[in-house]
Every structure is written in structure tokens, then in C-alpha cells.
């Protein structure tokens, strides 16, 4: 009996041990280091000042947090990052179902190339001499409007954000929709429901788990991304990820960069927790028939 119990315990550790170790090494410990760094003072030449100052006291303060909460520019950047992430999520969610298999293949194909190569390719697509820019400015010229630059703009950032994150919305939705029972739609049609009613009464409620999963997979990475605004955005298109990168690599203010990273992580976890709560609440409500 004791050997069987020890065998089950060993099996549990073999299954749960590697994920726990992975989270400990690559999430918990780095997060703890980031939290400790956020209470430190930046060094004279960047990085962190010595933990023990000349007076023998520990170098711990909340100056970086005070800077974040007193300078409104960082709150504005956070809001702009949320707007971009929400817009990216909603546009990815509104993808059509027609020609499903072909569209699914086209969605998966970009994974076969490097992320930066795909981003730089949009510089060619949106460039001033590209066919798209010429067509858009030609149409604007018909109405007497001034030509616009598609590259290095908010439009370019949003288009590339949608392009990069679209697979993370489509694949969970596709997996969810494949499990739906077609008989439910047939029964609704026999009862007189039109296509719009069948979608909102049957397809959409059943696809909510896929919607929540895809929204989380799109929103969280889009919230902290920095490469796309760096490459395709203009001077006013910096997001919170760009500011964090700047604090660590350019100004080398590691404590303030840690504060921004912590706030971003807390915001992402709060959104993920809210989405999980909404999903669980709607599932319980549907199960109870309310």
C-alpha cells in the first residue's frame, strides 16, 4: 500500500514538476528580481546603484513609483497601448468564415517565416512607392484631398498588429467552431430562425470559450509589443513596450523600467483574470438556464 502511494506521488511530481520548475525559473524568480529592482536607485552610469550605500543603509525607496504616478505622460501611453490592443483584438475577432480552409491556410503560412521579416515586409507593402499607397492617394486626389503616408503611422502599426496576432485569434475560434453540433443550427432553421438569429442565439454563445481564449492570446502580447511600433510607427506611436525598452537599453534607468514592467504585468493579469471570471460566469449562467 505504501509503495503504491509513493508510486502515485512520484508520478504526480513527474507530471507537475517540470511545469512548476519552468514557472519558478522563468517567471517567479525574474518577477521577484524585477520587484526588488523597482525599489532601487539607478546607478550613476546606468543599471542599479549599490544595494548598501556609503552610510551602510540599504538603498530602497519608492521614487520610481512616485515618478510613474505623478507624470501623466506614462498613464497616457498606457491608455494608448490599451486602445491599440483592444482595437487589434476586435479586428482579429471580426474575421469571416467564407472559404474557411483557404483562409486558415493563409493564416498559418506566416508562421513559416521569421517575425521580423514579416514586419519589415510591411515596409515594402506600405511604402510611398507601393501600389497600395498609390491607389489610396489616387483616390484621395479625386476628392481633392492631400496625399497621406501609410508608412510610419498609426495605421501601419495597427495593420501589422492585426496581421501578426490574427492567427492567435483564428486558431482557438476554429478549434471551438469545429466542435459545434450542426443539428442545433438545423433545428433553429426549422423553427423559423434566420441566419442572423441562428448566429446570435446558437453559434456565438457556443463559441464564447474560443472568443475568450483568442482575445487573451491577442490582447496580452499586443499590449506589450515594441518591435512593430519601433519599425512601422511614427514619433507619436510609441507604446508602453517601447518605453520599457528605452528605460532598460537607452536611458538605463532599470528601477523605473522595472516599475513600468510591473504595472504592465499587473494590468495584463487583471485583464486575463477579468476575462476568466466573465467566461466562468457566463458558462455557469448558461448551464443554469438563466
Image (cartoon, rainbow, N blue to C red):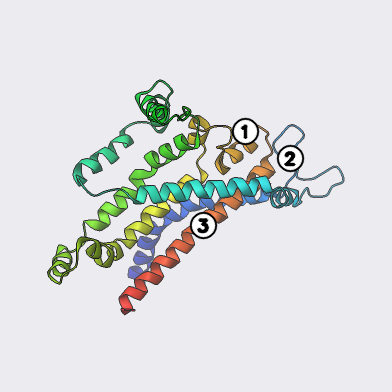
Residue 99 placement: quadrant = top left
Mark before the other along the chain sequence, 2 or 1:
2
From the viewer's perspective, is the residue at label 2 or at label 3 nearer? 3
* Circles 1 and 3: CB atoms closer than 8 Å: no
Q: Measure the C-alpha gap from mark 1 to mark 3.
A: 25 Å
Which x, y percent locates residue 105?
23, 40
Q: Could you tell me if residue 30 is visible in this image?
A: no
Which x, y percent locates residue 108?
28, 40
Residue lying at the far right in this picture: please name it. Answer: 55
Does 280 sit left or right of 191 as displayed? right
Q: Could you tell me if residue 209 is visible in this image?
A: yes
Question: What residue does disc 1 label?
Answer: 249
In the picture shown, does residue 277 fall above or below 101?
Answer: below
Q: Which mark is residue 42?
A: 2
Rendered residue at 22%/64% (across/down)? 198
Mark before the other along the chain sequence, 2 or 3:
2
Q: Quadrant of the C terminus?
A: bottom left
Amino acid at each position: 500500500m505504501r509503495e503504491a502511494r509513493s508510486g502515485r506521488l512520484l508520478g504526480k511530481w513527474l507530471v507537475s514538476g517540470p511545469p512548476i520548475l519552468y514557472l519558478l525559473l522563468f517567471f517567479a524568480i525574474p518577477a521577484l528580481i524585477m520587484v526588488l529592482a523597482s525599489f532601487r536607485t539607478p546607478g550613476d552610469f546606468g543599471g542599479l546603484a549599490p544595494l548598501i550605500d556609503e552610510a551602510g543603509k540599504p538603498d530602497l525607496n519608492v521614487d520610481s513609483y512616485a515618478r510613474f504616478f505623478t507624470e501623466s505622460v506614462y498613464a497616457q501611453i498606457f491608455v494608448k497601448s490599451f486602445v491599440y490592443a483592444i482595437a487589434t483584438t476586435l479586428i482579429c475577432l471580426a474575421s469571416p468564415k467564407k472559404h474557411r480552409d483557404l483562409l486558415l491556410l493563409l493564416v498559418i503560412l506566416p508562421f513559416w517565416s521569421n517575425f521580423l521579416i514579416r514586419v519589415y515586409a510591411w515596409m515594402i507593402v506600405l511604402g510611398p512607392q507601393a501600389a497600395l499607397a498609390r491607389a489610396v492617394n489616387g483616390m484621395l486626389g479625386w476628392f481633392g484631398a492631400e496625399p497621406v503616408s501609410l508608412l510610419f503611422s498609426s495605421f501601419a502599426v495597427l495593420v501589422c498588429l492585426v496581421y501578426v496576432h490574427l492567427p492567435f485569434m483564428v486558431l482557438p475560434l476554429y478549434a471551438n467552431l469545429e466542435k459545434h453540433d450542426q443539428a442545433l443550427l438545423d433545428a433553429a432553421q426549422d423553427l423559423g430562425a434566420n441566419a442572423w438569429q441562428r448566429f446570435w442565439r446558437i453559434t456565438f454563445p457556443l463559441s464564447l470559450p474560443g472568443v475568450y481564449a483568442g482575445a487573451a492570446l491577442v490582447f496580452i502580447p499586443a499590449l506589450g509589443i515594441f518591435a512593430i511600433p519601433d519599425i512601422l510607427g511614427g514619433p507619436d506611436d510609441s507604446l508602453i513596450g517601447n518605453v520599457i525598452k528605452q528605460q532598460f537599453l537607452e536611458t538605463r534607468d532599470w528601477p523605473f523600467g522595472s516599475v513600468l514592467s510591473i504595472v504592465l504585468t499587473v494590468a495584463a493579469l487583471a485583464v486575463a483574470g477579468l476575462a476568466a471570471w466573465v467566461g466562468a460566469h457566463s458558462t455557469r449562467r448558461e448551464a443554469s438556464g438563466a
